[in-house]
Image (cartoon, grey):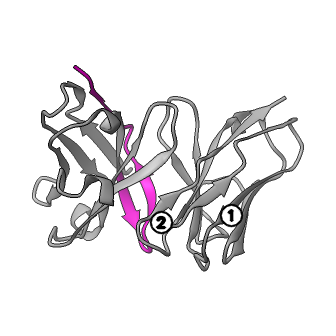
């Protein structure tokens, strides 16, 4: 299986820029997607195909990368962005998710 | 507005069976691949199974093959997950998700909890 590795947690102050990384154990081309999951809620799609912003998602969110290294950027971070962020690849079977990065606001 | 509403979860003894349902609305259900994704308590997300638009093709993660059966009724706009021989490691919140090509999840239900315990 393709393993996606994310940093477990980050803490930033409102107004700052934060980058959340996702590293794949093998190339996934640009078939990487990002989700936000707030406590007690279902995940929501933020970014698809590495860099495409899902409709209705604030432009503060952006994605980049290809191959094995991907980044989700939030700039500027707002208090409402407190959540866990997951990457997911759809290049290889089975579809796999990263372990999630918990973003906390200082 | 896309809505996915799961039901059928609960507390179940090991070895027993359970059938989850997901009622879909707000989109042309029969045109989309659908999937189940689960999340064990305090853990990350794990894709479980997917089904093609007509239901003729199904896909499972290895750990659930032979025990889980995904199906759909396009006349009722409903997705199902039959879970047999339940194990403690199946304890999780199960999400129904609409799939957009190439296989990512653009809408999720609120989830249904399955607890396997004696």
Q: Residue at x 52, y 43 (%)?
A: B44
Q: Is residue B91 visible?
A: yes
Tell me the quarter of the picture where residue A53 sits: bottom right
Nearer-the-camera pick, B1 or A54: A54
Residue A30 position in % (x across, y down) = 61, 77
**In the picture shown, does residue B5 fall above or below B80?**
above
Mark carried by residue A1: 2
Q: Residue at x 31, y 54 (%)?
A: B63
Magenta-colored segment: predominant secondary structure: strand
Magenta residues, start to end = B97-118
Q: Is residue B27 visible?
A: no
SS assignment at label 2: loop
Q: CA distance from mark 2 to mark 1?
A: 14 Å
Residue B49 position in % (x across, y down) = 30, 58
Residue B61 is a magenta residue: no
Lower sequence index among marks 2 and 1: 2
């Amino acid at each position: 299986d393709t393993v996606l590795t994310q940093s477990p947690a980050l803490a930033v102050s409102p107004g700052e820029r934060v980058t959340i990384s996702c590293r794949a154990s093998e190339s996934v081309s640009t078939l990487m997607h990002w989700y936000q999951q707030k406590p007690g809620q279902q995940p929501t799609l933020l970014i698809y195909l590495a860099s495409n912003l899902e409709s209705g998602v604030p432009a503060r969110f952006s994605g980049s990368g290809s191959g094995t290294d991907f980044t989700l950027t939030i700039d500027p971070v707002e208090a409402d962005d407190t959540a866990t962020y997951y990457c997911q690849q759809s290049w290889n079977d089975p579809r796999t998710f990263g372990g999630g990065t918990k973003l906390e606001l200082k | 507005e896309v809505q996915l509403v799961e039901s059928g979860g609960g507390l179940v003894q090991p070895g027993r069976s359970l059938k989850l349902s997901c009622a879909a609305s707000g989109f042309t259900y029969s045109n989309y691949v659908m999937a189940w994704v689960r999340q064990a308590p305090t853990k990350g997300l794990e894709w479980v199974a997917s089904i093609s638009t007509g239901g003729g093709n199904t896909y499972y993660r290895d750990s659930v093959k032979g025990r889980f059966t995904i199906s759909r009724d396009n006349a009722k706009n409903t997705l199902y997950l039959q879970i047999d021989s339940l194990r403690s490691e199946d304890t999780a919140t199960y999400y129904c998700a609409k799939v957009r090509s190439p296989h990512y999840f653009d809408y999720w239900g609120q989830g249904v909890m399955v607890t396997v315990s004696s």
